[in-house]
């Protein structure tokens, strides 16, 4: 496994430079396929939102697709697709990204499009009102009218954390969204979408010197602006268990979520890696501890999963974050029984440790997942960009497999000892059978 991780780093080396306006640029050349990926990551996410503007980071992601100074509405999509490419964007807790994959000869087109909206997106009353309606409909479809729509990603943080940055609804309340103004949007852009608050990562079939020339041509003229400090989102470790109960009229069965605070994903990375593998060991695959115990042996669960990070990607988040175990169980099974079984399995690892062969199987599966993600030019480029924006080192993306392979059974056991039942956040979801 260490060899595979090292090979990934060597096969796809990165080069970097910084423009005068502060834009950090990472190049990851790979001449094996005639494809390029262009991604821009802005250091602003859901946790940057001020009170009264919940959901604004996601709303602004939508706004960035509504045209710019030299690109009419819908033209960005048309130009990318006409070149045979694909595009998208996404909002995370700590960053927002925009990306496209295209034939190599369309590189300059993608750079022009991203530079134009970095310089001057079309922030108008019409675009804002239209996208507020789009986001509200998205919330209706994905949260309000879907079973388990808010569970546990919107609900568990409210009891697991204390600060507004960590507890508020990142999808946004209708009240906050509807009261947003063009001035709010313009201020958000000015504050967070400065070149110095972004990383441009280009991967694939590119010549480094030519790519640098094109980046200078299109992004160099974007005016520099002050860069906001990274928000402090870490919190003191909890000292008590916190519990809450929510009801879901659409859910077919009850569910339980248990969240534990974990080590700092950036500042305490080696300890954090033990926690990442612990989550995999607990729940990934039919041979995992919780799958065997809850689903197959005791038959007290319908489905279970454990993951680190709000969106299940442990490497795209800063402190503070959780390891979450999520269990859907039959109505006849008390939530307390499920909770006790989960804590017992964690305690067994904390007390007895992990056999080397079991950990090696988990590490091999995790390495395979990382290599699959890095197999495509776009996947690899996004990995480098995320590592650069979160950790300040794009190279880390190519080292993850080797770093995880080096984790010892003692580190995983220590991670299990950190999951104290007395400091967990526990959320019960009651399925109310369609009755409101």
Image (cartoon, rainbow, N blue to C red):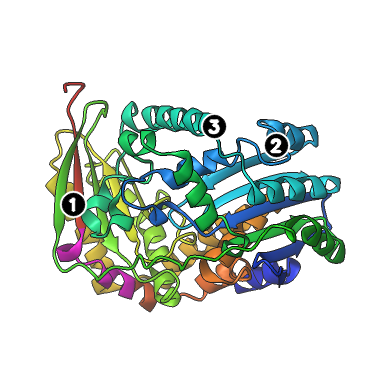
Q: Local crowd at mark 2 within 10 Å, few (<14), some, or many (≥20)?
A: many
Identify the disc placed on residue 76. 2
Is residue 397 rendered to the left or right of residue 304?
Answer: right
- Residue 185 in percent (x, y) is at 48, 44
Q: Identify the secondary structure beneath mark 1.
A: helix
Q: Residue at x 58, y 59 (%)?
A: 194
Name the residue beneath numbered marker 1: 339
Vertically, is 129 above or below 381? above
Find out whether the residues at labels 1 and 2 contact each other: C-beta distance under 8 Å. Answer: no
Name the residue beneath numbered marker 3: 127
Q: Quadrant of residue 73?
A: top right
Quick one: 380 or 292, which is closer to the camera? 380
Image quarter hosting the C terminus: top left
Q: Residue at x 42, y 64 (%)?
A: 276
Residue numbers of the magenta segment: 414-424
Q: Earlier in the sequence, mark 3 or mark 1?
A: 3
Could you tell me how far apart the alpha carbons at marks 1 and 2 are, in whole angstroms?
Answer: 49 Å
């Amino acid at each position: 496994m260490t060899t595979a991780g090292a090979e990934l780093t060597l096969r796809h080396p990165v080069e970097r430079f910084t423009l005068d306006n502060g834009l950090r640029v990472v190049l990851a050349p790979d001449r094996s396929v005639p494809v390029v990926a262009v991604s821009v990551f802005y250091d602003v996410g859901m946790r940057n939102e001020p009170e009264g503007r919940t959901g604004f980071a996601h709303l602004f992601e939508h706004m960035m697709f509504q045209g710019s100074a030299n690109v009419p509405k819908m033209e960005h999509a048309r130009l990318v697709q006409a070149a045979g490419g694909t595009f998208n964007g996404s909002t995370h807790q700590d960053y927002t990204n925009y990306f496209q994959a295209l034939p190599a000869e369309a590189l300059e087109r993608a750079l022009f499009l991203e530079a134009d909206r970095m310089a001057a997106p079309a922030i108008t009353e019409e675009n804002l009102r239209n996208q507020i309606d789009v986001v509200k409909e998205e919330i209706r479809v994905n949260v309000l009218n879907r079973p388990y729509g808010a569970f546990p990603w919107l609900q568990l943080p409210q009891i697991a954390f204390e600060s507004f940055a960590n507890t508020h609804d990142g999808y946004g309340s209708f009240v906050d969204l509807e009261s947003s103004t063009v001035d709010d949007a313009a201020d958000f852009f000015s504050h967070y979408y400065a070149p110095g608050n972004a990383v441009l990562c280009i991967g694939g079939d590119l010549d480094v010197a030519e790519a640098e020339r094109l980046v200078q041509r299109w992004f160099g003229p974007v005016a520099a602006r002050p860069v906001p400090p990274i928000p402090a989102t870490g919190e003191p470790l909890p000292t008590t268990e916190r519990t809450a109960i929510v009801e879901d009229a659409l859910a077919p069965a009850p569910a339980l979520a248990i969240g534990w605070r974990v080590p700092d994903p950036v500042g305490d990375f080696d300890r954090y890696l033990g926690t990442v593998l612990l989550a995999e060991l607990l729940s990934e695959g039919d041979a995992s501890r919780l799958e065997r115990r809850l689903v197959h042996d005791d038959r007290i669960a319908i489905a279970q999963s454990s993951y680190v990070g709000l969106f299940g990607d442990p490497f795209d988040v800063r402190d503070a974050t959780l390891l979450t175990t999520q269990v859907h169980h039959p109505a006849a099974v008390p939530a307390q029984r499920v909770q006790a079984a989960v804590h017992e399995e964690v305690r067994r690892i904390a007390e007895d440790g992990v056999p080397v062969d079991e950990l090696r199987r988990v590490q091999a599966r995790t390495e395979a997942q990382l290599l699959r993600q890095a197999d495509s030019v776009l996947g690899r480029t996004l990995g480098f960009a995320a590592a650069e924006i979160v950790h300040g080192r794009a190279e880390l993306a190519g080292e993850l497999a080797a770093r995880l392979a080096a984790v010892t059974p003692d580190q995983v056991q220590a991670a299990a000892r950190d999951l104290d039942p007395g400091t967990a956040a526990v959320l019960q979801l009651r399925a109310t059978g369609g009755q409101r």
